[in-house]
Amino acid sequence: MQEELSKSARRVQDALEKMELGCRVRELPSSARSAQDAASAIGCHISQIVKSLIFRTQETREGVLVFVSGARQVDEELLEGYVGARIVKADAAFVREVTGFAIGGVPPVAHKMALPHIYIDEDLTLMDEVWAAAGTPHGVFCVSGQDLLRATRGRVVRLSR
């Protein structure tokens, strides 16, 4: 029997079930706030961790959601080219406003509002098993890179040089 999930993790689990992905949210005893923390707690390679990063366009303040491997850094110039606008990292208030989740636990699904720009680093889509945040700094779930793509409907691009 699975332990009771926190409210945010339950919201993610419900979304995953609705999409019929067969994923199970786990809440870890230690924090998975950073990619290294998550990899250590799960026992996987850091490249299997999905970093969910939120940017916004500088002028129009549109949300930009990016998924990149925990082993990579986003090249913001490349990202600006895909978005077609200047971008800035979103602050905590903007992240919570558009996703409904706090930084460090932003999942790829169950957001408060649809984001107009979603990008997935091509490396993630090639992996059989990646781990994403599940609504809290302790929540995670495992999914294939292709199911992550299907669930988010993101555009596959190269996000790092």
Image (cartoon, grey):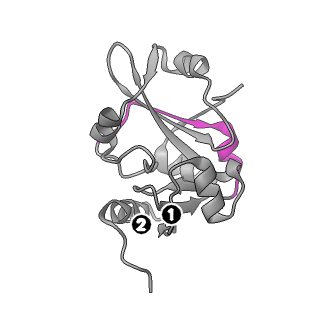
Q: In this orientation, which residue lies closer to the viewer: 24 or 101? A: 101
Proximity of marks 2 and 1: CB atoms separated by less than 8 Å:
yes
Looking at the picture, which amino acid does disc 2 mark?
Answer: Glu
Count the marks: how many?
Answer: 2
Which class describes the residues within 10 Å of circle 1: few (<14), some (14-19), or many (20+)? Answer: some
Looking at the picture, which amino acid does disc 1 mark?
Answer: Leu
Q: In this orientation, which residue lies closer to the viewer: 86 or 15? A: 86
- Locate residue 90: give its quadrant: top left
Tell me: 34 left or right of 9: right
Tell me if residue 139 is in the magenta stretch: no
Tell me if residue 115 is in the magenta stretch: yes
Q: Is residue 161 above or below residue 36?
A: above
| Image mark for residue 17 | 2
SS at mark 2 in the image:
helix
Res 10 visible: yes
The boundaries of the magenta stretch are 113-128
Which class describes the residues within 10 Å of circle 2: few (<14), some (14-19), or many (20+)? Answer: few
In percent of width and height, residue 156 lies at 60, 35
Q: In this orientation, which residue lies closer to the viewer: 128 or 95? A: 95
Report which residue position mark 1 lands on: 21
